[in-house]
């Protein structure tokens, strides 16, 4: 049964080693303290846990399947590949786990409305879904470039009664959507809860989002023991802000026999502004209220980023990922745009499953790892989302 987990990190100040913390204006401190208190209370409240579990099971459709990808395994020619099918969740991705949890906290705190940011649109759809389910008005900020390339998800949000606000500033993508959502939260903090969609932002968001997403890794452990007879040798997940990866990795952190691999967006190339490989090429800094690895220039200004995937083109990463990187617990690598398109194609052709472009990055690295390992080994990929949202963009890129 899914549980919200606790662990020694973060500490009471919201620090994962040197990372995390709260770097926010004074106007937000009351709301953050209120959220922290509500979450700490909810973690230990059987009624909250029961309602969260009920909605995950009855509404979201958990547990998601752990599926043996036989043809991808044959194509790679090495270790067995299993897919943790978060794409089969209601709304088509892992984002709904966290959105349901935070919507329940909105109710617990007595807030009257929900706002959110979104890049690929999956967190926006999940927030719109949770808001409709619980009867809240919802407003989602989305970069206008992402509105263009994620038209289907924009329609879904609006169909559920959510207002989608295109953001025209900056690169018109996820970073700018977070900026605008943060500004509105400061102005409406007494009545509004901001459902941050990833393990970013000021404490308690990185811990809280990780905990709500940890159901992914918990199920994977149980299913691996049942279906394989042991834990996997390698667990892989794509990393933008890092919520699906944090949820998948966290329950395995103390299982030292399991290698953990995070896959970032390599973009067009490794030049400044052409990728979103934050951990691989960034350095510690402050972004959106937390201290973590950030892509930045020599003056400390946040760098422009690019990825074919709207959900991965973010110049920061969750602070716990930075901690895991420094501790050597997780290995982080990257996959470029062209490779991810090939991963998309191979998964469609070999398994009859259309992956999100975010997930396609993980598919490429999973097949690389499997190819280098013996046939008795097992590699599990967090299949973070389905790709219907990306079909029009992939068609445009391939035809172009």
Image (tube, rainbow, N blue to C red):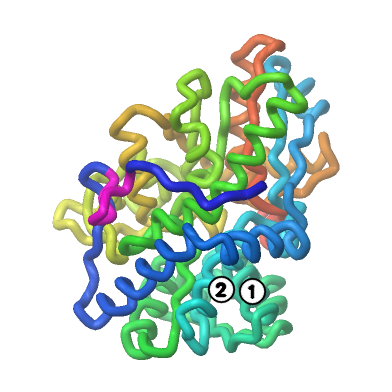
Is 333 in front, or is 47? 47
Q: Quadrant of the C terminus?
A: bottom right
Q: What residue is at 45 percent from the left and 32 percent from the top?
A: 253
**Residue 394: x %, y % from top left:** 69, 55
Is 215 in front, or is 299? 215
Query: Is 113 placed above or below 196 here?
Result: below
**Residue 134: x %, y % from top left:** 65, 80
Query: Is 289 placed above or below 292 here?
Result: below
Is 317 in front, or is 300? 317
Question: Which residue is under mark 2?
Answer: 103
Question: Which residue is under mark 1?
Answer: 130
Q: Which residues are magenta?
A: 9-16
Quick one: label 1, few (<14), some, or many (20+) residues within 10 Å?
many
Q: Is residue 335 left or right of residue 269?
A: right
Q: Secondary structure at mark 1?
A: helix
Residue 395: tell me if it is visible.
no
Q: What residue is at 51 percent from the left and 89 percent from the top?
A: 112
């Amino acid at each position: 049964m899914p549980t919200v987990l606790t662990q020694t990190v973060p500490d009471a100040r919201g620090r994962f080693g040197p990372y995390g913390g709260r770097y926010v204006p004074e106007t937000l401190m009351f709301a953050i303290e209120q959220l922290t208190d509500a979450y700490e209370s909810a973690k230990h409240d059987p009624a909250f846990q029961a309602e969260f579990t009920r909605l995950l099971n009855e509404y979201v459709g958990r547990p998601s399947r752990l599926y043996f990808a036989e043809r991808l395994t044959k194509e790679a020619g090495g270790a067995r590949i299993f897919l943790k099918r978060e794409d089969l969740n209601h709304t088509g991705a892992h984002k709904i786990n966290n959105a349901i949890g935070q919507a329940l906290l909105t109710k617990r705190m007595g807030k009257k409305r929900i706002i959110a940011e979104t890049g690929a649109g999956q967190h926006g759809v999940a927030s719109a879904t949770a808001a409709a389910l619980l009867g809240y008005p919802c407003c989602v900020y989305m970069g206008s470039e992402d509105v263009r390339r994620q038209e289907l998800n924009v329609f879904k949000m609006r169909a559920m009664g959510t207002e989608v606000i295109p953001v025209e500033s900056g690169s018109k993508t996820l970073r700018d959507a977070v900026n605008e959502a943060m500004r509105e939260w400061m102005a409406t903090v007494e009545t509004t809860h901001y459902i941050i969609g990833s393990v970013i932002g000021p404490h308690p968001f990185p811990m809280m989002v990780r905990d709500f997403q940890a159901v992914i890794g918990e199920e994977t452990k149980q299913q691996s023991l049942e279906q394989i007879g042991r834990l996997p040798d390698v667990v892989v997940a794509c990393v933008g802000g890092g919520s699906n990866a944090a949820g998948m990795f966290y329950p395995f952190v103390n299982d030292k026999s399991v290698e953990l691999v995070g896959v970032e967006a390599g973009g067009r190339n490794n030049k400044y502004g052409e990728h979103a490989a934050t951990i691989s090429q960034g350095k510690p800094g402050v972004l959106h209220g937390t201290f973590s690895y950030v892509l930045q220039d020599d003056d400390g200004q946040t760098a422009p980023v690019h990825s074919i995937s709207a959900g991965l083109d973010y110049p920061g990463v969750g602070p716990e990922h930075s901690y895991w990187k420094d501790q050597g617990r997780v290995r982080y690598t990257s996959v470029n745009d062209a490779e991810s398109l090939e991963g998309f194609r191979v998964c469609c052709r070999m398994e009859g499953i259309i992956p999100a472009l975010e997930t396609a990055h993980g598919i490429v690295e999973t097949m690389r790892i499997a190819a280098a390992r013996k046939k008795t080994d097992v590699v599990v990929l967090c299949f973070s989302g389905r790709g219907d949202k990306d079909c029009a963009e992939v068609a445009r890129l391939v035809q172009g």
